[in-house]
Image (cartoon, rainbow, N blue to C red):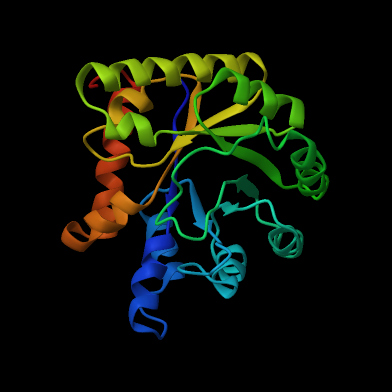
Amino acid sequence: MSRLRLGINVDHVATLRNARGGEHPCPVRAAELAAEAGADGITAHLREDRRHIRDHDIERLKNEISLPLNLEMAMTDDMLAIALRVLPNAVCIVPEKREELTTEGGLDAMALEKPLTPFVARLQDAGIRVSLFIAPDHDQIKAAHRIGAKAIEIHTGRYCHLLGKGRHAERSHISDAAMLARALELEVHAGHGLSYDNVGPIAAIPEIIELNIGHFLIGEAVFSGLGDAIHTMRRLMDEARNGDAL
């Protein structure tokens, strides 16, 4: 089974910085530590209200970090202009509501198919790989394929919030969705709410090639350090991928 990539989302290092003002702690430094700890990429969400990551963070992450940069952003003209100027390695298009604390659900690719198609084309014509952050829903995956995205990122929030049989059933939905996406030649990524306790069953799905994890690891870093937190997550992912633990 192929090695599973791990992308580290550094948004909430910027959240902590912005709570006090100034430049500390620095999300770019967090990205450097993530690279040293073996991360495969860096993810950052540039929100409309700039509540955590700011424009200069994106520019620095692109210019100063050796790892690929995955820019999470809404489908707006402002974000499109920023992406075309900075040229991140990848863009993940996410839904965004000003009042939400975090991204609460997947993008409705079906409803947005008409405007998304040229939006995605502009990014991919510039050499940026585009993924859509969507629920593990077959109709949404088919819409992502029609739109022309190269990848999807499956929203794992519902899986993480459920327990017992409910979580097992949702994991089956995610696995089925990943198989459909691969049949349509879409790269399959996943993320949202993943932790040490729940990452194994998702990491074991062979069609998924990348996990993007942020809030849990930044929180865990308060106690163990970012490097140790990433090493532990990497070990759990690898064990699940190799069938050693679920």
Q: Position of residue 244 (x, y in %)?
A: 24, 20
Residue 25 in sight in this render: no
Against 57, residue 236 (above or below) is above
Residue appearing at x 51%, y 20% in the figure: 178
Q: Position of residue 42 (x, y in %)?
A: 49, 53
The reply, left or right, for residue 35 in relation to residue 114 is left
Against 209, residue 16 (above or below) is below
Quadrant in the picture for the N terminus: top left
Residue appearing at x 80%, y 50% in the figure: 126
Q: Position of residue 132 (x, y in %)?
A: 61, 38
Question: Residue placed farthest to the left in the image?
Answer: 223
Against 133, residue 64 (above or below) is below
Quadrant in the picture for the C terminus: top left
Q: Position of residue 50 (x, y in %)?
A: 53, 69
Please tell me in which quadrant of the rendered image residue 185 appears: top right
Closer to the camera, 87 or 77? 77
Against 59, residue 138 (above or below) is above
Residue appearing at x 43%, y 53% in the figure: 9
Residue 82 in sight in this render: yes
Please tell me in which quadrant of the rendered image residue 114 appears: top right
The reply, left or right, for residue 228 in relation to residue 108 is left
The reply, left or right, for residue 35 in relation to residue 134 is left
Counting the numbered discs, the total is 0
Question: Residue placed farthest to the bottom in the image?
Answer: 22
